Structures are given as structure tokens and as C-alpha cells.
Amino acid sequence: MRPVDELILPDDVGYTENHEWARKDGSAMVAGITDYAQEELGDIVYVELPEIGQSFEKGAEFGTVESVKAVAELYMPVAGEIAGTNPELENRPDLVNEDPYGRGWLVMIRPADPGEMQSLMDKATYYNLLKGL
Amino acid sequence: MRYLPHTDSDIAAMLKVIGAGSTDDLFANIPEAVRSGRKMDLPPAMSEWDLRARMEALAAECPDCKFFLGAGKYDHYIPAVVTNLLERSELLTSYTPYQPEVSQGTLQAVYEYQTLTARLLGLEISNASMYDGASALAESLLMATRIRKKSKGKIVLSSLIHPSYGQVVKTYFRPTPFEITFLPALADGRTDVSALADMDDVVAVAVQSPNFFGCLEDLAGIGSLVGQTEAIFVTCFTEPLAFGLYQPPGTQGAAIACGEGGSLGLPPAYGGPGLGMLATKMDYVRRMPGRVVGKTTDANGKEGFVLTLATREQHIRRARATSNICTNSNFCAIAAAVYMACLGKIGFRELARLNYDKTEYLKQQLRRAGMALPFGAPTFNEFVVKLPPGFERKHAELAASSGIVAGLPLAEWYPDLADHYLLCVTEKITRADMDHLIKEVSE
């Protein structure tokens, strides 16, 4: 495990307590899991994502990521409808390890309330959360 | 190792530690409705020598029989090499090893079993075995509900699936909202699938081939019919030797093939233990019950074997396990792997041919002797024959006097088939045995 100081924590995303991130992309949001989460899980071998068009509440489980020795549930950072899923992950689930905020993105969400993005933690708050862990 | 159960003082000591007053207190959270409340119906304990004498007396009651009896368990010859290899201490263990550090040999043997099973059934991946054919079928149908993400709907079974398998499926599905429906039989001894066209919400269709009457189903035809619907096509078998001669289920449209592998090097042994085989397409691997052994490389690039997809199993994320099955027939699976490897592709085919030819001989001779063979579909090593009324009494006499077990009377499972018997011929039956049987039934 890399020290918290060495984890990549971009400024342009919001964070959740469950170690998901979300980034505004036009009227939609792109979401994934944080560098901390992928590091904790280890080599990711499978990602199960929802069907496009499904709607979830904030905090609802929308899928799972499976590593060689653990499975973690994925929780919605904000309420909304799934507008897209990352097609590359079917053959390359390890992209989540390699580039968690880029090519390893998980879902595109059409938020029910665009203002809900404000409820997510900023980089400093999330960093303090990790420090306290 | 002591083979003694807990003594009263052991039990008292354990109860004291956990603070329960009695074993009834210990089990208090198990609802009354699911407890039997009866004492076990067991004879009193015996000394070792009394027990030995009792078992020898039981064995002596069983003469060296000629079994024209199959119906799910087949009396095949087991080459000495199979038993000898299995008795090696590396393989003979009551424990299913998980730890790759210490159990490479067992894991590799199971991996070989999976490979041979997948090839035999014509599918991409096999699990590392299940309890027996009946539970493998029930688990396959549950798997179909997971693949289709259905929580209700129809599970359609051929009425020519082994009747006991049908009962096990009903038991598995009893607490679920799924509805079990049976397809009737055609006059030629195959399944009548015509009703499928008018059915809605079908989640899975299961057909056995060779079926309970020994008849080969038109799997390709049924496969393409089911393929036009949303339903998952599950095929099952009680006699995998048939795939030495006939097309395997995977090439006939089956999404899941499952059944009993006892024919592959395991003795009938009064019905057990069995070997549940289950193979499927790679797409469905994460919906498959039970465990899978995979091949990988270690940090130094050396080949090794590990339990894989373990996150669908009970020991990680128990609440979300793919199925409730929590052990397998590991040793039986290894026996089957040794058996298949010993016979090889050509030997397997030759053995299947021998079973087929012998059966055809018996069918022909019975027909000549004037017996009716009601079903016209092709069969493999098992078939139905109508014997003269009153044969029932002779059936028991024959076993006692000449050691001939003349098949299974079908009336108990299929009341319309009074005086009909299911006969089976394996390589262990000689032509003289068959001629003897024909003489007895013709008299």
C-alpha cells in the first residue's frame, strides 16, 4: 500500500466515503473508484456494471468490482440514471487499477439533481478522511 | 483417528463453554417446524467384530449378480489402474485442499478433470464437480435463473428426466416463486416439446439425453427451438458414456450440460457416492455454482494451479455466494479424470460402441422372441421392453436363483407402463448372459 501522500487525488472530482469519485461532464457526471480504493482491492479481474437506463438513489449499490481476493460493492455518488457504462472494462478490467480517474471510469450518470455534486467531499476533506483511516 | 462421536461429558463440557443448558437450548433458534423431533432410527452400537460379521453376512446375501439394471447407475468395468492410482496417498484425502502452496497435485488433478469434462460435454468450462447428477441439474436450473436475472417464471422439464432428479429439482425450487412444468412424452419415447411454443415466461428448459427410457433426444432440434426464445437450454444425462458415440450437448445448443458422472470409473456401490458434472459457456462462468480450479503463473513465471473465481464461493462474501452448495465430490472427480485419461479418446469411443452393440443385440433377440419394444427412438445401452404379464414374480425369483437382475419395473414411476421394464446392457454383460435372460423371459 502506497502512503496516502503518494495517492493521486485530482482536484476536479468529488469524493464519497465509500471511495467513489464523480466528475462533471457537461450535464452528466462520470464516476469511478478512487486511487485509494483500487490500491486496497489489488488486481481487479472483473467489473459488473448496471444496465443503461437504470435509476438509483444516492448511496444505492449499482455494481461490483472483483479483485483476485475480494469483491467490493459500488455505490452511487449521486442519485440518477445510468446514461452509459465503460465498454472497455469488459476486456480490460485492470484499467481501473491503471488509470482510475481516466480510462478506468465506470459509469456515466444523468443526475436527478445536478446540485447534488456539491454534497461530495473535496480533495482536502477526502485526504483527511484517508489520513484518519 | 477416533471414529467415536462425542461422549456425554464432551457434550456437557462444550455446552458449558458456550453457556447453553442443553442441546435443545443450543438449537432453540432453529424453528420447530423444520425439526424432525424423532430419534434417529438406528440399531444399537456394535463391537468392531460384531459389525464386521454383520457386514460380511450382508455381503454374502448379495450373489455375484448380472445386472441388466441401469436407470441412473451403470455397472461398468473399472480398470485396475484407476483404483491403484487413486489409492496413492497424494490423491486419497477426505479434504478438498484450497491452499495452492501445499496442494498443487490435487489442484492439477481437478484441473485435468475440468478439462476432460468440458471436452466430453462440448462446452467451454466445467466446474470442479458437484454432489451428484440430481443436484447438478437443480443447481443448473438455479444458474439459469441467475443468468436471465429472473426471480419468477417457468422451469420446464421433460417428463423423461430421471424421476428422482425431477423430485430433487422440485425440492430445490419449493421455496421459490418459480413454477415447475413437465413436458409429456411422444409415442417414440422422446420428449414432446410442442407445448413450448405456447408458453410464456419460460426461464429454462431441461431435457435429458439419453433420457430415462434410454432414448436419444433430438437435442439439436430442441436446442434450436429453445434458442429462439429467452429460455436457457439445460441438458442433463445419467450416462455420459453415450457422448463417446453421440454428439456432445454443447454442440447441440445446450447452454449448460449437467448430470451424473458415476459411469466414469466409480462403482455403483448401492447408489453412491455420485459425481455431479456441470459444464457451460465461458460467458456464464460467473453464474456457475461450485468451485473452479484455474491455471496461472507465479511471481517467477512458473506454472501453478489455484482455486479461481473464489469470490463467488462461500468463503469470501458468504451472503452473496453463487449457490448454497458448499462441498463437491473431489475424490470422485479425480477418479473420473483418471478413468477418462486411461481410456483416452479412442478407448472411450470403443467402449461406447461396445455398449451400443451389445444393447442392440439384446433388443434384436427380445424382438425375435416376440417381446414388444414400445419406443422407436434410437437408444444407448438402455431401453424399455414389455415382458409377459406375470413376469413381476419371476423378476424376484431370477435374482435369487440365477443372480440375474432383469431390469427395473417401470410401473411405479410411470403407471401407464405396467409390465414394462427398463433393461440396461454394459460391457460387463456377455452374450451368454443375454441369451440366458432371453431364455428366462421367453419361458
Image (tube, coloured by chain):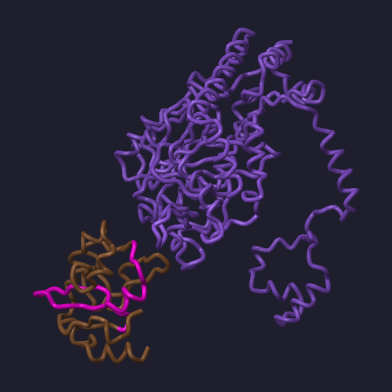
Residue A108 versus residue B379 in the image, above or below? below
Q: Is residue A66 left or right of residue A8?
A: right
Find chain B in the image and tell me its colour. Answer: purple
Residue B264 versus residue B384 in the image, above or below? below
Q: Nearer the viewer, residue B301 or B363?
A: B301
What residue do we see at 56% from left, 56% from top? B103
User: x%, y% of residue A123?
Assistant: 22, 87
Whether residue B152 is visible: no
Residue B234 versus residue B142 in the image, above or below? above
Q: Residue furthest left?
A: A26
Quadrant in the rendering for residue A11: bottom left
Q: Is residue B121 left or right of residue B276?
A: left
Q: Nearer the viewer, residue B396 or B437?
A: B437
User: x%, y% of residue A125?
Assistant: 26, 91
User: x%, y% of residue A54?
Assistant: 24, 65
Whether residue A65 is visible: yes
Q: Nearer the viewer, residue B175 or B274?
A: B274
| Figure quadrant of the N terminus of chain B | bottom right
Q: Which chain is represented by brown in the image?
A: A
Q: Is residue B211 left or right of residue B199?
A: right
Report if residue A18 lies within the magenta region: yes
Report if residue A88 lies within the magenta region: no
- The stretch of residues the image draws in magenta is A17-45
User: x%, y% of residue B328?
Assistant: 57, 52
Q: Residue furthest top?
A: B368
Quadrant in the rendering for residue B250: top left
